[in-house]
Image: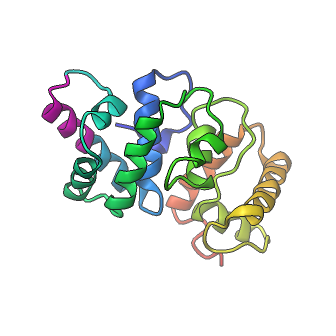
Amino acid sequence: MIDLTKVPYYDMPDWWLEEFALTAIAVAGKTATVVAPRLSSMLTALYANCGFICNAPFTAIRSVRMETVQEYLKIYGIGCYNAKGKSMSRLAHRYLDLRTCTTDDLESVYGIGPKTSRFFVLHTRRDVRVAVLDTHILKYMSYMGFKVPKSTPSGKKYKHIEKLFIELWEFEGNGRTLAEYDAFIWNEYRRKLFATAT
């Protein structure tokens, strides 16, 4: 199972990158620590159903119809199962190189936006300069005095706020990588440190 409290992860095997990419899709807009274990259980059941004896997330998804993936997501309580099942199926069928694909490559897949693409890239590769503008980051930026929306922006606004967050990291990152800084804020947010921020 992918433990999102311990990101970033580097130099992982291909099957792990595939599961992490699926996790990034599954947790979008949901409570990550609840959804990630459900996805892991779902994949285990899918492997068993397909007769797989090893982890092969994309191969398993490619071996069934998109509607089957959607049904599994529904059974395991992963919300927005129709859209997320479509995203997962489309991603598995794109045969992207998950070690080198760009955020634009990922965002060309149905349902993957800038937050999800950056979440994957930030926590699987060293020295990338992207920001995952999830609620935890936006709440922290608000806490620090920035005027930011409460929900993830898109387009030029996303890129503008991303630039501000990277500048904030450069100022107060204390030697952490961007991925470590993101994870630090997320874990502090989970402990309600910034709950009073507006």
Residue 174 x %, y %:
78, 42
**Residue stretch in magenta:** 41-52
Residue 6 x %, y %:
49, 39
Asked where in the image residue 189 lies, by quadrant, the reply is: bottom right
The residue drawn where x is 66% and y is 44% is 104
Instruction: Name the residue nearer the viewer: 127 or 26.
Output: 26
Q: Is residue 145 left or right of residue 196?
A: right
Residue 139 x %, y %:
64, 68
The residue drawn where x is 40% and y is 26% is 15
Q: Quadrant of the C terminus?
A: bottom right
Instruction: Name the residue nearer the viewer: 16 or 89.
Output: 89
The count of marks equals 0
Q: Is residue 87 left or right of residue 39?
A: right
Does any portion of residue 39 appear in the rendered image?
A: yes
Residue 143 x %, y %:
71, 70
Asked where in the image residue 59 lies, by quadrant, the reply is: top left
The residue drawn where x is 64% and y is 48% is 182
Q: Is residue 190 left or right of residue 183?
A: left
Q: Quadrant of the N terminus?
A: top left
The residue drawn where x is 41% and y is 60% is 31
Instruction: Name the residue nearer the viewer: 14 or 139.
Output: 14
